[in-house]
Image (cartoon, rainbow, N blue to C red):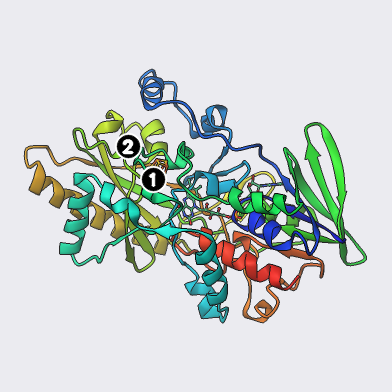
């Protein structure tokens, strides 16, 4: 049987492995290791913070190796480096966000139907909402913002609302791409962890395999077909290392939180992002932001006394990643949309304060700008839709991850990337 190398085991890679195993002999090369949820409890995190020991987000991988961090002058970028990739540290949101692909002419209805047969999606968590979440939901309804309970992927009828979604679900409630990976392995696929792919070997216009670093060793994996799904920050670097240029169109869906002190809100012990408000160019959703809580001086309150709402922005396609650095400036349009989001969040929180606790002083603060949805540096063009194969790649080299997205969804991306990876695999 012909050999396929799939690089990465996140949303795109695990999907590709599952779709291809059987037709091809698949080996998945994954830079990270087995995923383990963060075990450190909240009181210990609080102690570290109070002792002034959390000073730089780049410390995160020291105690949580599954999370990779890049810091740019504008923001902190986080993504998963482990089996399951960023899906393992996701908040389980299951949103269909393929509007830009559809506008381009790509109809992924069949793939989404498959996904909804394979992955349980529900809003069963709603019965566990805390009082302040119900109140914020009602307030945003009164403001005409049309909030919707967030669809979540997994067995959410079992969710205990511990609020540790981005640290890894300790109860196995959340669906993540390791489930697809397990199915691929059951069909005979091989998974190699700790194998960081550096480049694709290309001879006479065809990919002949990939070079990977494994500890101090450099190893060559021969292949008849290569599928890159190392995520929106790594796939472009692998391509560039292989002599294939990408486009300076990096998007990341930046997140900014607006928060206030709210004694005993205990949002930190509630499931993240229980409902969503869709606006032009951004979404709003209640969120306890660990990055700001641990590293921002303004967030000096005990975790249980913080209440926040996130703005997740569909940023413009401006930015690059290279082997050495990520460059992701915000444009004037990005800043103005963020400002509009901040205004709406502040209004929601102020209405809540006036209604529930008028004696609490009205004091709000912003979080650290952060992002976890890198995408877009080899966007599919209309011409390439028929095969989902970018023209500039050799015929037996494919991309099956967020790198292909033509524009920032400003929305959770996992389901859309899975749908796209399924479509890519239909052409192989
Ligand atoms: C904190 C957080 C929460 C999120 N929550 C949600 C959510 O609730 N819902 C949602 O839809 N989206 C969410 N997202 C976004 C979503 O997880 C990503 O958009 C999606 O997983 C991207 O899929 P991908 O296949 O492009 O990359 P990833 O899922 O990141 O997978 C890339 C994989 O490639 C591996 N890799 C990287 N470089 C190499 C290399 N050189 N060689 C080998 N392997 C490599 C990585 O370790 C990783 O396993 C969240 C993201 C973050 C960071
Ligand atoms: S709130 Fe807790 S139990 Fe529920 S999905 Fe998140 S981590 Fe899992």
As helix, strand or loop, the secondary structure at mark 1 comes to: helix
Q: In the drawing, does residue 319 fall left or right of residue 93?
A: right
Q: Is mark 1 within 8 Å of ligand 2?
A: yes
Q: What is the CA distance from the residue labelled 1 to the residue labelled 2?
A: 18 Å
Asked if residue 158 shows in the view, the reply is yes
Q: Residue at x 20, y 46 (%)?
A: 132
Foreground: 284 or 33?
Answer: 33
Residue sitting at x 62%, y 61%:
403
- Please give the name of the residue rendered at 62% of the width and 54% of the height, measured from the top-left corner: 180
Rendered image quadrant of residue 284? bottom left
Upstream in sequence: badge 1 or badge 2: 1
Give the farthest residue toward the top.
51
Looking at the rendered structure, the secondary structure element under dot 2 is: helix
Judge by depth and name the residue closer to the eye, 334 or 421.
Answer: 421
Does residue 343 appear to the left or right of 337 in the view shown? left
Quadrant position of the N terminus in the picture: bottom right
Residue 305, position in %: x, y?
24, 33
**Residue 313, percent across and down?**
41, 59
Which residue bears the numbered disc 2?
268
Residue drawn at x 46%, y 67% is 96
Dot 2 beta carbon under 8 Å from ligand 2: no
Q: Is residue 317 visible?
A: no
Callout 1 environment at 10 Å: few (<14), some (14 to 19), or many (20+)? few
Tell me where residue 100 appears, x and y as whole percent: 50, 73
Q: Which residue is mark 1?
A: 158
Is 120 in front, or is 269?
120
Identify the image quadrant of the C terminus. bottom right
């Amino acid at each position: 049987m012909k050999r396929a190398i799939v690089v990465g085991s996140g949303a795109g890679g695990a999907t590709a492995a599952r779709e291809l195993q059987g037709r091809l002999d698949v080996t998945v090369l994954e830079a990270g290791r087995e995923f383990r949820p963060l075990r450190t409890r909240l009181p210990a995190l609080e102690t570290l913070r109070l002792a002034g020991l959390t000073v730089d987000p780049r410390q995160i991988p020291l105690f949580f190796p599954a999370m990779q961090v890049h810091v740019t002058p504008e923001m902190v970028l986080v993504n998963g480096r482990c089996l399951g990739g960023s899906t393992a540290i996701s908040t389980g949101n299951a949103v269909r966000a393929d509007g830009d692909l559809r506008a381009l002419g790509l109809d992924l209805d069949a793939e989404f139907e498959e996904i909804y047969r394979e992955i349980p999606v529900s809003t069963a968590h709603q019965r566990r909402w805390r009082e302040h979440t119900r109140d914020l939901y009602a307030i945003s309804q009164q403001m005409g913002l049309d909030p919707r309970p967030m669809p979540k992927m997994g067995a959410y009828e079992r969710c205990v609302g511990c609020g540790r979604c981005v640290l890894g679900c300790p109860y196995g409630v959340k669906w993540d791409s390791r489930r697809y990976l397990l199915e691929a392995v059951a069909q005979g696929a091989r998974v190699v962890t700790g194998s960081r792919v550096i480049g694709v070997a290309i001879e006479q216009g065809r990919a002949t395999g990939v070079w990977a670093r494994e500890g101090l060793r450099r190893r060559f994996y021969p292949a008849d077909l290569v599928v890159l799904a190392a995520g929106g920050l790594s796939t472009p670097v692998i391509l560039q290392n292989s002599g294939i240029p990408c486009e300076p169109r990096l998007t990341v869906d930046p997140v900014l939180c607006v928060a206030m002190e709210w004694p005993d809100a205990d949002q930190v012990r509630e499931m993240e992002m229980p409902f969503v408000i869709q606006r032009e160019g951004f979404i709003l959703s209640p969120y306890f932001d660990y990055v700001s809580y641990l590293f921002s001086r303004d967030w000096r309150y005990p975790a249980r006394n913080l209440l926040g709402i996130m703005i997740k922005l569909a940023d413009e396609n401006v930015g690059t990643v290279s082997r050495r650095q990520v460059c992701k400036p915000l444009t004037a349009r990005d800043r103005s949309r963020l400002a509009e989001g901040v205004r709406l969040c502040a209004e929601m929180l102020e209405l809540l304060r006036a209604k529930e606790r008028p004696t609490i002083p009205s004091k709000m603060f912003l979080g650290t700008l952060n992002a976890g949805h890198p995408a877009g540096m080899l966007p599919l063009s209309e011409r390439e839709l028929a095969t989902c194969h970018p023209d500039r790649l050799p015929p037996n080299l494919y991309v099956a991850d967020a790198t292909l997205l033509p524009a920032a969804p400003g929305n959770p991306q996992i389901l859309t990337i899975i749908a796209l990876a399924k479509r890519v695999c239909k052409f192989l």
